[in-house]
Amino acid sequence: MIASSWLLVAFPALGALILLVGGKRTNGWGHLLGCATVIASFVYGAAMFFGSSFENAEDTTLYSWIPVEALQVDFGLRIDALSMIFVLLITGVGSLIHIYSIGYMSDDAADGVGNSARARRRFFAFLNLFVASMLVLVLGNSFVTLYLGWEGVGLASYLLIGWYQDRPAAASAAKKAFIMNRVGDVGLALAIFLMFKYIGSTGYSEVFAGIGDLSPAVVTAIGLLLLLGACGKSGQFPLQAWLPDAMEGPTPVSALIHAATMVTAGVYLIARCAPIYNLTETGRLAVTIVGALTLLIGAIIGCAYDDIKKVLAYSTVSQIGYMMLAVGLGPFGYALGLMHLLTHGFFKAGLFLGAGSIMHGMNDEVDMRKFGGLYKRMPITFVTFGLGYLALIGFPFFSGYFSKDAIIEAAFGGEGWQAWVFGGAALLGAGLTGFYMTRLVLLTFFGKERWREIRSADGREFHPHESPPVMTVPMMVLAVGSVGAGFLFTFGDRLVEFLAPSVGSLAEAEHGVVPHALIPWLTVGMSALGVLIAWLIFGRRDIPVERPRNVSAVVRAARNDLYGNALNETLVATPGLWATRFAVYLDNKGVDGAVNGLAAGLGGGSGRLRRLQTGFVRSYALSMLGGSFLIVAALLLVRFA
């Protein structure tokens, strides 16, 4: 079956092709084909997973892709433990999101084309393209193949985030995501250039075999450039600002981006490059610092937003920060970061689909202050969302409890200031997660039914209701994963042992600054403290529909994304705009001015000289006489000077 692994990519890629070029003939059944192709990839991936051994990586070459003298790049796939867990996550969660989208997008024609069936068909084509690109990214056996999938994911995200073409905010968010990702992509491209320059190849096997022969400075440079690429794709500091804005796209897109595809790519890249990061302590430290900073930034901002999707978006920023923190710990955390990535895929997809279900029943409203008391109106959504909430905050024996606690324990497992700083940041993040998620649940499902007092933006009254089975069944499946995935992965260290051939065995810290037995209690205690504070503030009193304006400087900063956008605007966007304007001015007045000035001078001079050609003999004779006088005068001047 490994020889036919290309079918994993071929199914969704073919689905995207048929739906994009098939025209109106595919409008009636295009959504069904879109779901079938991803389900087929999942079934084939599951058969490979249970029918093969992954003790050694197996590469399959499909064809010679770039045969240019020394640059020989084959288009091939690598099947190993790391790629297979991503295949199952992408296609498994992706299948559920595709099925959910049938109900969510059933009447959606707001893509600017005015045809609901055509819009739905195009939407599923883009979803298929997204999944196919992500599969190329994780299955490629070289950095160039990875880069192909990397850019394909960027294109698909641009198309889907900007889906609502009649909304300026959606168009702006799509451009922002595309441009900020290009910043990270430059880092990844430069890293690939360095690999080819110093190793002579971009294949995983050749690069990992030859990386040990390079100087530490070059290895560190490659590691830092790879990190820049990971920061862009996974929304990590300082390139995190695009990820919350991506909520302008349809909710299934948000679920796909945040749970199964795009934002996991950065974590995959670092884990795949474990042989590189094992050789550069500076590179690992940079990854860890980025993860610790980002998990706190995302958690703090998530405490202040009232938009349910943006709270979940910043939650993703924070949770990906946990994963980056873990993989930055090297042998102590590669497998732990990937474990949290898998458990997060279940509960975060369930939470986003739950948010979409709430929007479906609330006229697309996203302001949690306009919700309240929905547990009685949407019981299935409440239960499935609640299970995802418990998993995310690390409630004992839910999936997040096993994966996030393991990361916090590993962060405290070092020595000196790093253990205190990184472990403390991870522990504080657990408390903040408990706070912002409890606030979200209280404002949405409990308290006074505030939606009775207001009307939606289009003037309609709210009539909350449960979503149809095509939406609730995928939510139920994900809720089961939210509860049991962590126990399944940690039982007997199954996942850690399975991943060992790809990322190495998990190194256990012999001692740490905090006893291992105490960390689970500290983590649960911090999370419980966050839950308690949220209940004391939001659970014991009526919440006003209008957001309070008189708030502290900290809350104001969190509402403004901790001024991350302002920082990017000041340090990058504005200087870039000035530089662009100067370059345009230099081009217009300098380069074009010189060319145009020379042409104008020749043209003007020719016009003036042409006036001397009168055609009259007497004029020419007078000119010759005048010239003769000038020559004689010059000779006399020279003679008698």
Image: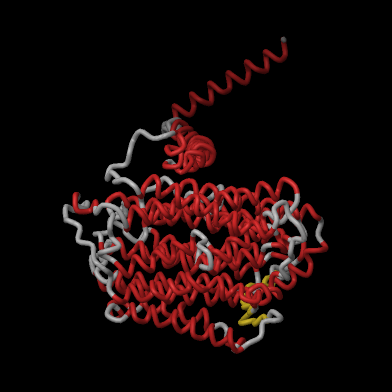
Q: Where is residue 576 in the image (x, y as percent from the top left)?
A: 52, 41
Q: Which residue is drawn at 38% across and 72% down?
A: 475
Nearest the eye: 446 or 8: 446
Residue 189 visible in the snapshot = no
Camera-side residue of 577 and 218: 218
Question: Which residue appears at 28% of the width and 57% of the height?
Answer: 373
How far across and how far down the image is residue 52, in percent? 63, 87
Is residue 287 positioned above or below 495 on the image?
above
> Above or below — where is 16 with respect to 520?
below
Q: Quadrant of the N terminus?
A: bottom right
Quarter of the picture containing the C terminus is top right
Residue 346 x %, y % = 48, 69
Q: Where is residue 421 in the image (x, y as percent from the top left)?
A: 66, 46
Q: Is the image coloured rainbow, by chain, by secondary structure, or in one colour?
A: secondary structure
- Where residue 283 sits, quadrant-wise, is bottom right
**Residue closer to the observer: 45 or 356:** 356
The answer to whether 516 appears left or right of 562 in the picture is: right
* Left or right: 207 as drawn, with respect to 355: right
> Left or right: 222 with respect to 18?
right
The quadrant holding residue 161 is bottom left
- Which residue occupies the foreground of this view, 259 or 596? 259
- Classify 106 as above or below 196: below
Residue 144 visible: yes
